Amino acid sequence: MFGLNISLEKSTLFLAGVKTEDSEAILDQFPFNKGSLPVRYLGLPLLTKIMNVHDYSPLIARVRARVSSSTARHLTFAGRLQLISSVFFIKKLNADLEESKTGEARARSLSEEWKSRAKELEEELKEANDLERSASSSLESVMKQLEGSTDKLHDAESEITNLKHQIITLETTVARQKEESEQRLTELSKIEKEVDSLKNEPETKEKEKNRALYKEPDASLNVQRLLEQRKKLLADLETSKEEEEKGKKAMESLASALHEVSSKGRELKEKLLSQGGGDQEYETHIEDLKLVIKATREKYETMLDEARHEIDVLVSAVEQTKKHFESLKNEWEMKEANLVDYVKKMEEEVASMGKEMSRLDGLMKRTEEEADAARKKEEETRESLKEVEEEVVSLQESLEEAREESVRLKENLLEKETEFESVVHENEELRDKEDAALRKIEELSKLLYEARLTKREEVELSESETEYDLLPKVVEFSSENGHRSVEEEEEEEEEEEEEEEEEEEEEEEEEEEEEEEEEAISNGNGVEEKGMNGKPYMKEKKEESPPPDDDDDKDDSVEVIFKMWESCQIEKKEAVPDKKAELETEEVEEDSRKVDESDKASSAYVSFFSKKHPN
């Protein structure tokens, strides 16, 4: 700390004696970019000129022209070293600031990436929730379908039970109808027997008819015989009538003869009376004739009565035979009509029984078909129920998978949120460090500005004093100039060799430190650790001077800068203890470790995301 205070005092004394334009010219000689140096870290006199970018080129040309004359005159070696050390310290702070800015930009990019990834994860979570909702809705629909199918199954089972009851009732009805059909078949067999008997009865009737027909000629013969007898009787009657007429005629003739006889008897009686005795014989003979006539009359009357009685008997017999024949014919016709009606009724009953049997057969077939259809429907409902159960199981499995996926996504989201929070926390820490570095830079810029002001005042005072001191020493300086220049050249060569050796040692040390940092920062996969902006760390350029010009003043300024840099490094080594260097290396290692962890997390997340979403 004591050495640092001495260097700061020297820098303040140096800057107090240097003009603002000279300090600006000195700052222009160094290889850092003013555009990378924030405006608030520079002195106030430079603020107005650095704001105008178009004033750089004339300012640089003007300052370079003045540096060659003013720096050699006014700047002492210690002041130059302090100025260079402060400038390089500011440059280092600017580099740290740039690194912090790049780290902040990278952290912002990472935070934006994490935010975008969080949004993507939220969208994926929403999609998973939507999938879960759709799966739940599909599960609900499937459950509703399952309930509907179960209801349908219950309905089908109830229908099947109803069909079974119907089948049982149909079987009972079929059995009853079978019994009735058997009874009807027995009745039909009886009826067939009766029909056969009736069919046989017409045969018997036909036989009887044939017999009757066979008997009819006998009857007809009898009738003919009776008719012949009638005819004979009629002929006899006619003959008897003729005989009666003949008898009448004979009676008439007898009457006439009797009358003639009576007339003759009268005549005879008269004659007898006239003759007497011979009349009695004639009277006895007349009485005998009267008796014979009476006996013949009675005989003929009895024969006529007998013939009339026989005719009446024959007529009544013929009428009775006609009536009996007509009654038999009517009975036969009635029996034949009844038989035909009965046969028609039996045929109708047989046809109705056949229709009933066919209807029963159709009903049996229909019931069997309905039973088969019910069995098929039951099998189909069972198969559909099995399919629905399988679908429900698959949907439950898919739902469980979706839930597991959503849980896994939620866990990943929580992990990413924790990682994002850690990155945000690291970003905040980096911002805090950046703010601390900015505060340090502001303090150093203020100190630099104050040192410049004090140095400017001291330089103005020293200029006024040196003007009086330079006049008597001009001759001595010119006489001793050659010898001193040779000695100074030898000293400068020795100093340059020492500086080169020290620079080589410092480069080796820096390379070793960089190798250690790379080993500490490396991610274990042999990949070169990247910086905060995603680019690999680059070794700092060791070109501490701008490209050489043709002027000798610039070469001298470069040599002076190297000498001042060497002295600044020596003073830094003297001023800053080893503990501070160790703390800085530890802080660098911690920062690199945090960056390594964040890069590892980001690379792991990228690999996870690439595995999860290959497209």
Image (cartoon, grey):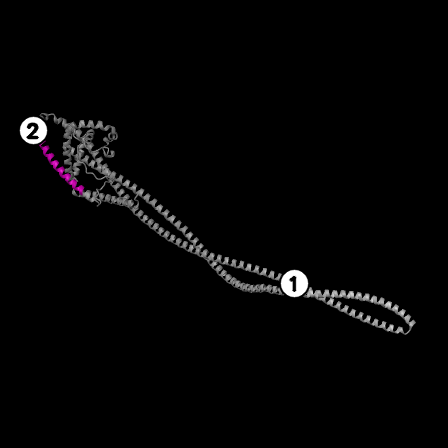
In the shown orientation, is residue 209 left or right of residue 3?
Answer: right
Magenta stretch, residue numbers? 487-515
Q: Give the alpha-carbon distance from disc 2 to disc 1, as whole Å.
A: 195 Å
Q: Which residue is mark 2?
A: 483
Inspect the image, locate mark 2, and give the three-letter code of the amino acid beneath it: His
Which residue is painted at 90% across and 69% down in the image? 267
Disc number placed over residue 531 in the picture, else none: none
Disc number placed over residue 329 in the picture, else none: 1
Looking at the picture, tell me which residue is in the foreground, 327 or 381: 327
Looking at the picture, tell me which residue is in the foreground, 143 or 466: 143
Tell me if I can see residue 583 in this picture. Answer: no
Above or below: residue 436 compared with residue 290: above
Q: Secondary structure at mark 2?
A: helix
Q: Disc 2 vs disc 1: which is toward the camera?
A: 1
* Circle 2 crowding by C-alpha within 10 Å: few under 14, some 14–19, many from 20: few
Image coordinates of residue 251 in percent, x first then y, are 82, 67
Instruction: List the single residue furthest toward the right.
Output: 274
Image coordinates of residue 575 in percent, x first then y, are 16, 39
Q: Earlier in the sequence, mark 2 or mark 1?
A: 1
Above or below: residue 497 compared with residue 261: above
Q: Secondary structure at mark 1?
A: helix
- Disc 2 + disc 1, Cβ < 8 Å: no
